[in-house]
Amino acid sequence: MNKLFHSAFFTEILKALRMVFGHYFVKEVTLQYPHEKNTLPDTHRGALCLLRYESGEERCVGCDLCNAACPSYCITVVSAVEENDHVVRRFATSFDIDMTKCVFCGFCVEACPVNALGMTKMYEYSTSNKRDLVFDKAKLYEIGEKWHGQAKGYLIAHNQEGEDETVSEYRYRFPSSRKQEEEQKEEVEAQVDG
Amino acid sequence: MEEKQETADRLDHYGEDELDIEYVDGKPKKRVEDLLLNMGPQHPSTHGVLRIVLEMEGEVIVKATPYLGYLHRGVEKLAENSTYTQIIPLTDRLDYTSSMTNNYAFVRAVEKLLQVEIPERAEYIRTIVAEMQRLAGHLFWLGTQALDIGAMTVFFYTFREREILLDLFELICGARLTMSYFRVGGVDRDLSQEVVDRLYQFLKTFPEKVDEYNTLLETNRIWVGRTRDIAMISAEDAVNFGLTGPALRGSGVNYDVRKAEPYGAYDKVEWEVPLGKNGDTYDRYWIRVEEMRQSAKIIKQCLDQLPEGLIAVDLPNLTYPPRDKVETDMESLIHHFMIATEGFDVPEGEVYCGTEGPKGELGFYIVSQGGNKPYRLRIRPPSFIHMGAFEHMALGYMIADIVTIFGTYDIVMGECDR
């Protein structure tokens, strides 16, 4: 009898309609993309860039680790050694990233021993010429200058770099666990001393 | 006679004059033949590039042959030339709707071969992200399956929740779809307090949202009519075909890798395995909805229990050394260079390790001859195994049901063709 009532009066459809009409009074979640943009977190893995030290010196030493770590083989580095007044300096003469191959895994940034590479929140660089997507050294430094804050933010968010010079954190260590360890160490030392 | 001539002229016009046509009383005799229907590879509801050749008798399917391989990228071969760390981004692209569980499955297989123990905090984080991915995967399935069948509103609602989860993934690891979050020996980044807070907030409202989808579908007569008794498979057949995941549990077989061989933090939290009775599409829908509720429960308990500690093992030949030490300590710098250039060495041996993904058991079989690259990597994708049961499930149903039938076991061609 109950079943007959439900099938005769389309109760389940009325219930669903009531729920759907209720959504007219809920704040909409859609973003109208070109006009509205989502705020990206610092961790966002976007286009790559090269960074300089504050003195303006290039960070990259041309060690080729980014190339070795890359799973899609999209980085090409040519390095050189320069000797000036008995000061040896290694640097990259050319540094190309093929953005058409890049999979944005962030392994190169992870591998870089001097934090020369960073990732920005830049994602709107589509072009009609495919060759423009091979970023050379000049272009990468240009991006690095333009989005310096974002690249720094990425490195800090991924525990690659401390927020200031004094802070240095283990990459795979939860900060509080390190504190605990230090406390334990101090305790042990205190006991030994005692 | 005149009539016959007219028919012949018409056939001539269509270029079919060579056909042997028998005439009965001056009219062409009716012929009966099976209709061969090509579905895909460019059909919008084949979930990628799947081609099926259907033999139809009227509207009824008498034979269904899937042709696979349109999305073959040679992942298994590529893996043979990549170090173990470099394979992680490749696994992202297997089942692109659930890259976290793909990462998890691969990383677990390598860890089984290495016999390393993972810190507790890392295990909990892994469980949390894997369950989040299961939620995202099931929401994706529910939305697209309903859309294929004709219920459009559900799609909008499920993608609203999926979007929240993807934003959280971006906050955790930096990407929304291809995460590459797991590392052999742990995970890449720690969960920040913001992630934990937002996840709690999401879980608070999520059960209501599941009820919302159910209001639209559970008793809806069109949904029930289109899913009940469609793509039936008995428990015995399901086991024989090697089905896993919701497709197997829909037939009432109690098998879940998370319960059978607990990993991560699954044995430390309370949850149940939902089981179906009839083994039809409706049961599988019900199971996935129930699994979403269970996943939410697992995440909540894991967040409550989340211990402090390391998020990756502290082994100098497996994980990157401390970042600050790289700049000051010679040995650390050497280790850093060794791991970045050569990866880590894995002992000789063979291992199979299955992990419960949203679609079923995703297994990785690794043959190692020592060194930093696998000799052979074999992937056991649930979608590929489920495709074997496709014809068995499709026979005797109507053409309109075909989309429901391959949607029912949540097929993703990236995983199927590898």
Image (cartoon, coloured by chain):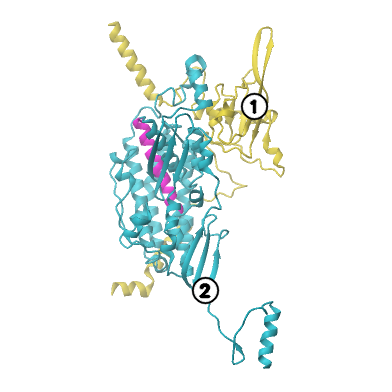
Chain colours: A yellow, B cyan
Cβ–Cβ under 8 Å for marks 2 and 1? no
Q: Nearer the viewer, residue A117 or B254?
A: B254
Same chain letter for marks 2 and 1: no
Residue at left offset 54%, top offset 52% = B69
Q: Is residue B41 above or below residue B415?
A: below
**What is the spatial separation of the Cα atoms under label 2 and label 1, in whole angstroms?**
61 Å
Residue B309: % across, % down:
36, 27
Element under label 1?
strand
Q: Based on the displayed image, in which of its 4 quarters is residue B368 positioned?
A: top left
Q: Quadrant of the N terminus of chain B?
A: bottom right
Disc number placed over residue A25 in the picture, else none:
none
Residue at left offset 68%, top offset 93% = B2
Q: Nearer the viewer, residue A123 or B280?
A: B280
Residue ID for mark 2: B34
Could you classify mark 1 by the number of other residues whose Cα lies within 10 Å: few (under 14), some (14-19), or many (20 or more)? Answer: some
Residue A136: % across, % down:
69, 31
Residue B178 visible in the displayed image: no
Residue A171: % across, % down:
46, 25
Q: Based on the displayed image, in which of its 4 quarters is residue A151 positioned?
A: top right
Q: Nearer the viewer, mark 2 or mark 1?
A: 2
Q: Is residue B185 above or below residue B364?
A: above
Chain letter of the residue beneath label 2 in the structure image: B
**A180 horizontally vs A23: left or right:** left
**B35 horizontally vs B355: left or right:** right
Residue stretch in magenta: B117-140
Majority secondary structure in the magenta region: helix
**Residue B293 on the magenta segment:** no
**B405 horizontally vs B8: left or right:** left
Residue kind at label 1, given as amino acid type: Val
Residue ID for mark 1: A77
Q: Nearer the viewer, residue A109 or B48?
A: B48
